[in-house]
């Protein structure tokens, strides 16, 4: 029954993410913004809501067990960037392997792609340093959290500033599918788009809240810690919207949207959420936590190095998938 509940809540999360991101694409088209903004900010934040809400609701309104809430929170905060930088990116290679081959190339808009990776690496480095700051130095930890929030706002400003030039060069957002609410007869107006956004968000909150209690119960049944379960299971489940959207986009040769959806979510989850985790959780370098952080940084640095030397190739992102397998070996052993 527990696992059926988890499956049901997962379906609710996926359905609500589809409703939300469908509206986001139309919002990007109506506002006349670039694929970079739609992918790295709008779609990234939208599809990141499930894994974003898990730690927030766990910490602020989770179960009656505070330590379980903290473990789920830390696991979900750090597990999401780990999943995005390793397994999620590597799946794009399998999606285009037949059409592009092992030595085929990806072609995301390079300035935005590199900007996303640079900002994530900088922010996640601060999150890693914060793990080694003693808890009694609250002012130091608070300063690190503030810097991480500031990094995200600077990132948003730079991404929006680049939008106009990208639209003029042919990187404007185009929604390929009609609005879901318009299929039942509603007009394609800004108000209808906002209504669909709100409906999607409400469903996300409900599904994520149920998922938290399911994880707590499943951890007890399986006899493993909520931290380990939330590091491995929650990200696989809640990152599905990013995976599915990016795979669909990359198969349509929309590499900027595909990669922006993943790297933009990495920046969002590598800045704001760790800042909250630093202040509301123990945020300590436990083995499985530290292993996840180190592998996330290695995976991101590898992609940044490869993309900086020329077009990113299909086999490059397979390295990231192998790093996720390494992480599984470290934690499960």
Image: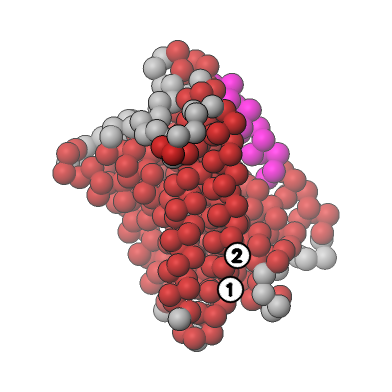
User: Which contiguous range is marked in magenta?
Assistant: 148-162
**Contact (CB < 8 A) between labels 2 and 1?**
yes
Q: Is residue 235 above or below residue 178?
A: below
Classify mark 1: helix, strand or loop: helix
Residue 157 included in the magenta stretch of the image: yes
* Residue 65 left/right relative to 263: right
Residue depicted at 51% across the width and 23% down the height:
30
Local SS, label 2: helix
How many neighbours does mark 1 have within 10 angstroms: few (below 14), some (14-19), or many (20 or more)? some
User: To which residue does mark 1 refer?
Assistant: 213
The residue lying toward the viewer, choosing from 273 and 167, is 167
214 relative position to 237: left or right: right
The residue depicted at 23 percent of the width and 42 percent of the height is 96
Disc 2 from disc 1: Cα separation:
7 Å
Q: Residue 209 carries which label?
A: 2
Predominant secondary structure, magenta span = helix
Seen in the picture, residue 160 relative to 4 is either above or below; the reply is: above
């Amino acid at each position: 029954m527990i696992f059926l509940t988890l499956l049901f809540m997962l379906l609710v999360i996926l359905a609500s993410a589809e409703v939300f991101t469908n509206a986001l694409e139309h919002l990007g088209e109506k506002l006349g913004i670039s694929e970079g903004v739609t992918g790295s900010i709008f779609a990234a934040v939208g599809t990141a809501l499930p894994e974003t809400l898990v730690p927030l609701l766990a910490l602020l309104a989770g179960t009656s067990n505070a330590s379980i809430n903290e473990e789920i929170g830390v696991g979900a905060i750090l597990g999401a960037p780990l999943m995005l930088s390793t397994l999620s990116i590597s799946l794009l290679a399998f999606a285009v392997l037949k059409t592009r081959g092992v030595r085929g190339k990806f072609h995301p808009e390079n300035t935005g792609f590199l900007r996303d990776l640079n900002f994530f690496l900088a922010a996640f480095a601060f999150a890693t340093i914060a793990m080694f700051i003693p808890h009694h130095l609250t002012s130091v930890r608070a300063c690190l959290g503030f810097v991480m929030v500031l990094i995200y706002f600077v990132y948003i400003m730079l991404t929006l500033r680049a939008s106009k030039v990208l639209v003029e060069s042919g990187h404007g957002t185009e929604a390929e599918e009609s609005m879901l609410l318009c299929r039942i007869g509603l007009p394609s107006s800004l108000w209808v788009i906002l209504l669909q956004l709100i409906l999607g968000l409400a469903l996300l909150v409900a599904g994520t809240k149920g998922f938290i209690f399911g994880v707590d119960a499943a951890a007890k049944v399986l006899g493993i810690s909520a931290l380990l379960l939330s590091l491995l299971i929650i990200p696989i489940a809640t990152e599905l919207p990013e995976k599915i959207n990016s795979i669909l986009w990359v198969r349509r040769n929309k590499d900027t949207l595909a990669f922006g959806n993943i790297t933009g979510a990495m920046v969002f989850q590598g800045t704001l959420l760790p800042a909250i985790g630093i202040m509301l959780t123990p945020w300590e370098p436990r083995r499985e936590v530290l292993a996840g952080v180190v592998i996330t940084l290695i995976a991101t640095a590898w992609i940044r190095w490869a993309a900086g030397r020329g077009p990113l190739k299909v086999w490059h992102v397979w390295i990231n998938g192998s790093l996720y397998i390494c992480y599984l070996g470290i934690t499960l052993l």
